[in-house]
Amino acid sequence: MLRAARSGLRKSLLHTEASFQPSRTTVSHASAEELQTSTLLVSCPDAKGISAAVFETMYENNCNVIRSDHFTDKADWKFFQRLCFQLPKAADVAAVASAVSRLAQTWKMDYTLQHHNDRRKVAVLVGKMDHCLWDLLIRHKSGELKCDINVVVSNHPDLEWVAQAFGIDFVCISRPQAPKEQRKQVMESMLEDIFQEKGTELIVMARYMQILSEEFCSRHAFQTINIHHSFLPAFVGAKPYHKAFERGVKVIGATAHYATTDLDAGPIIEQGVVRITHRDTVEDMIREGKDLERVVLARAVRWHLENRVMVHGNKTVVFN
């Protein structure tokens, strides 16, 4: 009788265990070739349920969220979110854009929706110094910067051969013989003609040592990245390494920021520093600084292209 009871208990347990086995279904996954990746950036007044509403919109439109980051600035309770998601290439992209637009209206959002297969066209502005230009073009050639650098513009002819080495158009805008303000207007007008012809969407000032007008900065708000060779807000303007040497600082830096009407005072995207000593000359600082400038500018450009940067007043939120 005991043996029969044990046998019955064993059968009962096996039956129970089998009933809890997960069902095995075949899930069809789209290949990488069948998917496209997109990024959604949103900012709005902070409120309960925002993230849930964003994810619900993604789910209802067959979007697969692969990364999400968010931040709330408690100084003014402003909410920021970056959402990276995938959807089939055959999906109705217009329907997704329409759904996001309705979401934005409901929650009073500012937003940017960018599809990664849309390679933005970039113009690089340079002067006579070539270190940042070389670095950007090498990174672009290697595929690190997902964009199309299609023109290099300068007010000097010195770096034409560098652009030609990479098969990129070079345009030298001559400095007209005219009063300073009129000269600036003429040069910026020539720049605008080039940008329109090339379809420029991002301007990178790779040591282009010219001050831009208020009108120019307004037309290209937060689409113009400048590299300044100091750790801002210290030593704005010209010859910051000389000023740093005279001040006897122990740290020098480089700053990538969006160009605005205020000289070297736009929203900062990235910064880097290096320690120096009393033994370092101005020439030593310049050499050390060039390394920083390359890396800091490249990071800022890449983060902008990857839709990781959101402007908040005169600051930025950067999702790394």
Image: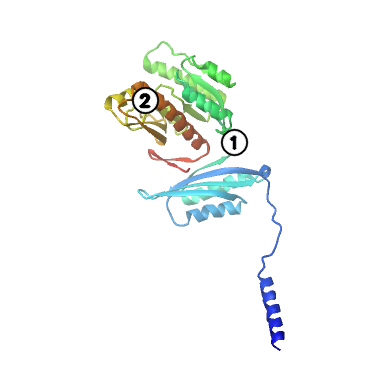
- Relative to residue 129, is residue 34 drawn left or right? right
- Relative to residue 147, is residue 231 drawn left or right? left
Camera-side residue: 252 or 204? 252
In percent of width and height, residue 63 lies at 60, 50
In the image, residue 53 sits, relative to residue 259, either above or below, namely below
Q: Quadrant of residue 276?
A: top left
In the image, residue 99 sits, relative to residue 177, either above or below, namely below
Instruction: Say the numbered circle drawn on residue 118.
Output: 1
Q: Quadrant of residue 185?
A: top left
Which residue lies most toward the bottom here? 1
Pointer 1 and pointer 2: residues touching (CB < 8 Å)?
no
In percent of width and height, residue 4 lies at 72, 85
> Real-space Cα distance between discs 1 and 2?
39 Å
Packing grade of label 2 (10 A; few <14, some 14-19, many >=20) is many
| Residue in the picture at 40% in, 16% down | 182
| Residue in the picture at 47% in, 57% down | 49
Q: Which residue is mark 2?
A: 285
Question: What element does badge 2 sit on?
Answer: helix
In percent of width and height, residue 76 lies at 36, 48
Q: Quadrant of residue 288?
A: top left
Please, what is the three-letter code of the amino acid marked with disc 1? Asp
Camera-side residue: 318 or 47? 318
Residue 148 seen: no
In percent of width and height, residue 258 lies at 42, 32
| Residue in the picture at 57% in, 51% down | 58
Packing grade of label 1 (10 A; few <14, some 14-19, many >=20) is few
Chain-order first, disc 1 or disc 2: 1
Q: Please tell me whether mark 1 or mark 2 is closer to you in this view.
A: 2
Question: What element does badge 1 sit on?
Answer: loop
Please, what is the three-letter code of the amino acid marked with disc 2? Met
Q: Quadrant of the N terminus?
A: bottom right
| Residue in the picture at 49% in, 28% down | 203
